[in-house]
Image (tube, rainbow, N blue to C red):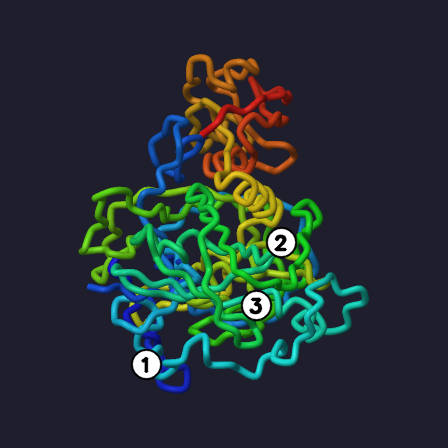
């Protein structure tokens, strides 16, 4: 995409008018600098066969969210699939026109070297769960040293995001779109800046474009965070984001968990292979200056929604709970409008921690991660006579996992291993969250009757 956010408006100056309320878009909170479904489809789209989620295109990144006040008490867990038509990657921050934060980067030239007076400036080094949390500052002090700034550069351009130390030996998780410069480079040079100002060369251990995650490694011991169980995350829980928005390393914002069990459909960020080239017209692949969306593939991922402020540069950073545990890895935000009018509307997304943990373990162990395949074509339920939302099976792949489990065309999938499914995107995201070969419980409705089936997933 030729990122419509070629500059970031001065927050102290006059602010441009916002577009009409209905004109909202999803964007990745990443800022870069260019050098020069299967199971599930979006609402109102035609059904798609269950085949590997295409991720050859890049992720849109570039959020400028505002911190939101704490809403009322938690609501029940409920999943709603979202089609990302304009998601800003929270990860990369660059200094050239064509990417969010570009103009501002001139003012914040040091980017990662620029240290803000955040709650983590004098952070400790334990990186452990906070035993008796009292304030946001306690969590920031404990977890801050585990969050790093990730800088990527190649002939395709350069960018900056965030990362989180998650395993002993210098292993750091970040977004795939950070290390591939939003899908533009397969050989980017990676540098990590720690919270105490050390610059370390990093190598890529493995990438997983299917869910926009990557693991990199530095030759240093960093304090690591602990993972929260996604099943324990509740709407209304405290949410604390730490990262390098707009190049401001060690920045801390807070809010709440706004929703859980979301299925989110966003642009992919697989690095080009061989002589494959991305479109020069849309080098960062999400939408173009004139508002037209560039042709791109998409992926569906399970996310936690938060109103904690997430901005370009936050991609790959930590979303933590009140105990300092990792709830998710920040990946995208929703934004109103485009160009100078784009910015946060208090809707950010982080990849669920349980998925992150599984993928990290697989990438460290073998350099590759696996994902489940149901073997079915599904679509949203639009007929009120069906009586429930969900993902309705249209076709089955011969010999696929769904057929082997006894599922039939017309069945409406309402949950995958307890995670609610309200549409096709949800179904795709939940199936992808499981490893190939995993056995999951599919709740479905057939002819008005509820039932369950044990399904051993195929491999993507």
Residue 44, picture quadrant: top left
Q: Nearer the viewer, mark 1 or mark 2?
A: 2
Image marks 3 and 2: residues in contact by CB distance under 8 Å: no
Give how far apart the Cα atoms at labels 1 and 3 are.
Answer: 23 Å
Residue 120, given in percent of the width and then of the height, sits at 62, 76
The residue lying toward the viewer, choosing from 301 and 210, is 210
Relative to 224, residue 116 above or below: below
Instruction: Say left or right for 254 vs 189.
Output: right
Give how far apart the Cα atoms at labels 3 and 2 are.
Answer: 18 Å
Q: Which residue is mark 2?
A: 167
Sooner in the amino-acid sequence: mark 3 or mark 2: 2
Residue 242: mark: 3
The residue lying toward the viewer, choosing from 269 and 263, is 269
Task: Identify which residue is drawn at 35% across, 57% down.
Answer: 188
Residue 241: mark: none
Look at the image and tell me whether residue 22 can be seen. no
Q: Nearer the viewer, mark 3 or mark 2?
A: 2
The secondary structure type at the circle numbered 3 is strand
Give how far apart the Cα atoms at labels 1 and 2 are.
Answer: 35 Å
Residue 288, given in percent of the width and then of the height, sits at 24, 58
Q: Which residue is mark 1?
A: 106
Instruction: Say left or right for 278 vs 313.
Output: left
Instruction: Judge the density around disc 2: few (<14), some (14-19), many (≥20) Cα neighbours within 10 Å.
Output: some
The secondary structure type at the circle numbered 1 is helix
Relative to 20, residue 12 above or below: below
């Amino acid at each position: 995409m030729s990122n419509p956010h070629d500059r970031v408006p001065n927050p102290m100056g006059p602010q441009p008018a916002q577009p009409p309320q209905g004109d909202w878009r999803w964007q990745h909170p990443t800022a870069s600098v260019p050098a020069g479904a299967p199971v599930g489809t979006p609402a109102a789209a035609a059904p798609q066969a269950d085949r590997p989620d295409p991720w050859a295109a890049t992720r849109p990144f570039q959020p400028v969210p505002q911190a939101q006040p704490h809403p009322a008490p938690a609501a029940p867990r409920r999943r709603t699939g979202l089609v990302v038509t304009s998601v800003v990657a929270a990860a990369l921050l660059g200094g050239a026109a064509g990417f969010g934060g570009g103009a501002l980067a001139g003012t914040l030239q040091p980017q990662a070297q620029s240290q803000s007076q955040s709650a983590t400036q004098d952070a400790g080094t334990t990186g452990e769960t906070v035993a008796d949390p009292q304030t946001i500052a306690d969590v920031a002090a404990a977890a801050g040293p585990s969050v790093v700034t990730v800088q990527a550069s190649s002939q395709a351009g350069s960018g900056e995001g965030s990362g989180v130390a998650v395993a002993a030996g210098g292993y750091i998780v970040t977004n795939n779109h950070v290390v591939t410069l939003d899908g533009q480079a397969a050989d980017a040079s990676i540098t990590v800046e720690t919270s105490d100002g050390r610059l370390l060369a990093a190598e890529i251990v493995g990438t997983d474009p299917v869910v926009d995650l990557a693991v990199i490694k530095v030759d240093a011991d960093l304090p690591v965070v602990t993972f929260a169980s996604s099943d324990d995350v509740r709407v209304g829980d405290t949410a604390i984001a730490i990262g390098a928005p707009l190049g401001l390393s060690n920045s801390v914002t807070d809010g709440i968990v706004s929703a859980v069990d979301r299925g989110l459909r966003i642009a992919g960020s697989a690095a080009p292979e061989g002589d494959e080239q991305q479109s020069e017209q849309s080098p960062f692949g999400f939408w173009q200056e004139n508002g037209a969306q560039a042709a791109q593939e998409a992926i569906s991922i399970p996310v936690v929604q938060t109103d904690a402020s997430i901005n370009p540069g936050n991609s790959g950073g930590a979303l933590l709970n009140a105990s300092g545990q990792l709830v998710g890895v920040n990946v995208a935000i929703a934004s109103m409008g485009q160009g100078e009018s784009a910015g946060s509307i208090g809707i950010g997304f982080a990849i669920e921690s349980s998925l992150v943990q599984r993928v990290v373990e697989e990438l460290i162990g073998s350099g590759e991660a696996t994902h489940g395949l149901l073997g079915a074509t599904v679509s949203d339920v639009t007929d009120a006579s069906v009586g429930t939302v969900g993902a309705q099976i249209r076709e089955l792949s011969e010999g696929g996992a769904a057929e082997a489990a006894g599922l039939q065309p017309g069945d409406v999938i309402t949950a995958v291993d307890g995670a609610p499914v309200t549409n096709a995107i949800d179904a795709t995201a939940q199936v992808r969250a499981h490893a190939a070969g995993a056995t999951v419980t599919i709740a479905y409705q057939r002819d008005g009757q509820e039932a369950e089936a044990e399904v051993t997933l195929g491999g993507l």
